[in-house]
Amino acid sequence: MTAHVQVGSKKWLLSKLLAAIGYAPVRIVLWDGTQSVPPRIDPIGTVFIKDWRCLLRLAIDPELYLGEEFSGGRIEIQGDLPEMLAAVSSAACGRRRRAWFPRLVSHWLEWTQNNTLGGSRRNIHRHYDIGTDFYKLWLDSQLVYTCAYFTHPSETLEGAQIAKMNHVCRKVQLQPGDTVVEAGCGWGALALHMAKCYGARVKAFNISHEQIVYARERAVREGLSGQVEFVEDDYRNITGKFDVFMSVGMLEHVGLGHYDELGEIIQRCLKVTGRGFLHFIGRNRPMRFSPWIRRRIFPGAYPPSLRQSLEVFEAHDLSVLDVENLRLHYAQTLKHWLDRFERSSDKVAEMLGPSFVRTWRLYLAGSTAAFRVGTLQLFQIFFAPAANHQVPWTRAHQYSDNRAGRQEQKWIPAMS
């Protein structure tokens, strides 16, 4: 390749990359010192691209290959990573390309990661069975791996996770003696909280072996094994009748093709006077989920739009009673997680290697950015069978804790 052709090819690839990311306020520096900065914009950070192959892959599909190249150390980024990713996401908004390669990757992932009974177990194992010791390094003390609820911006992560569990329990008006089935229970924090603080009897399902083992051990330590049963099984095998159906952070792993199946299970297991709750990451509109996230972080995952999520309810005569969006709360939660992850990055590298650290740094920073700019949402839906007339008249119960005799804020300012 002649020097003239090399220069021309390099400029063409760089122009394709800049067009794809919407001329974000980011300086791009190539391996030979060539720089590119969008005109009349002060860059907020610098991206170093180390070789031809890296530039070519970014020009083909920046959404997929940014993660691959960053994880492999062929891209270095200087600057505030969440801020830079948020800027790129905002600049690229509306520039979703319909190129054949990204579509091909998405179709391939949908086929290979389908959430069948066996497929779900494989997908969940790849993320949640990495090792509990890893998650202990950066989650809160109870290992709650879902969006927290900040009653004020300076709330600690531990306090905000307890506030979230109380917020959830109040939404379903959990009462002593209520029977609860939880689909996807993580390390068991919510199931144990419902039993210990609200007097409920809980049957919690999960297909992550490591999480179930930890949850059972904690139940024994806290003397709650008589009130909480942790079942290592798929939600599709739930049987029996319950007062409450609870799912926090599982719908993202169900897959669109299985929503009707989930709704049928909810309808079958809820009493006529029952109540239900879904808490999940979603979108403002249906769109392709990040192929890199599906490939390296969350196999089989898909965050639905609010309209898509209603497919769970509509065919089964389940009435939606309340919808809340906690997007900024998740941005704040992820800020805490990323800060803790960075403080523990040396230990993570010792456990799982430097490439793993870069992969999860990008995942946590990118998720923080997505919730900040609004490409991801956090929906909570409270619902009940249509024949249930024992439902709340107002939302007052959501913001008062009679046990603690305190009132929580009904509104919080936007958090940076």
Image (cartoon, rainbow, N blue to C red):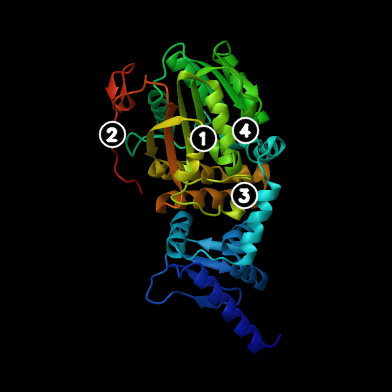
Check if mark 1's residue and mark 4's residue have beta carbons within 8 Å. no
Q: Nearer the viewer, residue 343 or 290?
A: 290
Of the numbered discs 1 and 4, the one sitting upstream in the chain is 4
Nearest-to-viewer mark from 4 and 2: 2
The N terminus lies in which quarter of the figure? bottom right
Q: Nearer the viewer, residue 340 or 145?
A: 145
Give the residue number, with chain letter if any, for mark 3.
Answer: 294
Of the numbered discs 2 and 3, the one sitting upstream in the chain is 3
- Tell me the crowding category of disc 3: few under 14, some 14 to 19, or many 20 or more residues within 10 angstroms, Cα based: some
Give the residue number, with chain letter if any, for mark 4.
Answer: 132
Give the residue number, with chain letter if any, for mark 1.
Answer: 315
Nearest-to-viewer mark from 4 and 3: 3
- Tell me the crowding category of disc 1: few under 14, some 14 to 19, or many 20 or more residues within 10 angstroms, Cα based: few
Q: Secondary structure at mark 2?
A: loop
User: What amino acid type should be assigned to the residue bearing mark 3?
Assistant: Arg
Give the residue number, with chain letter if any, for mark 2.
Answer: 410
Nearest-to-viewer mark from 3 and 1: 1
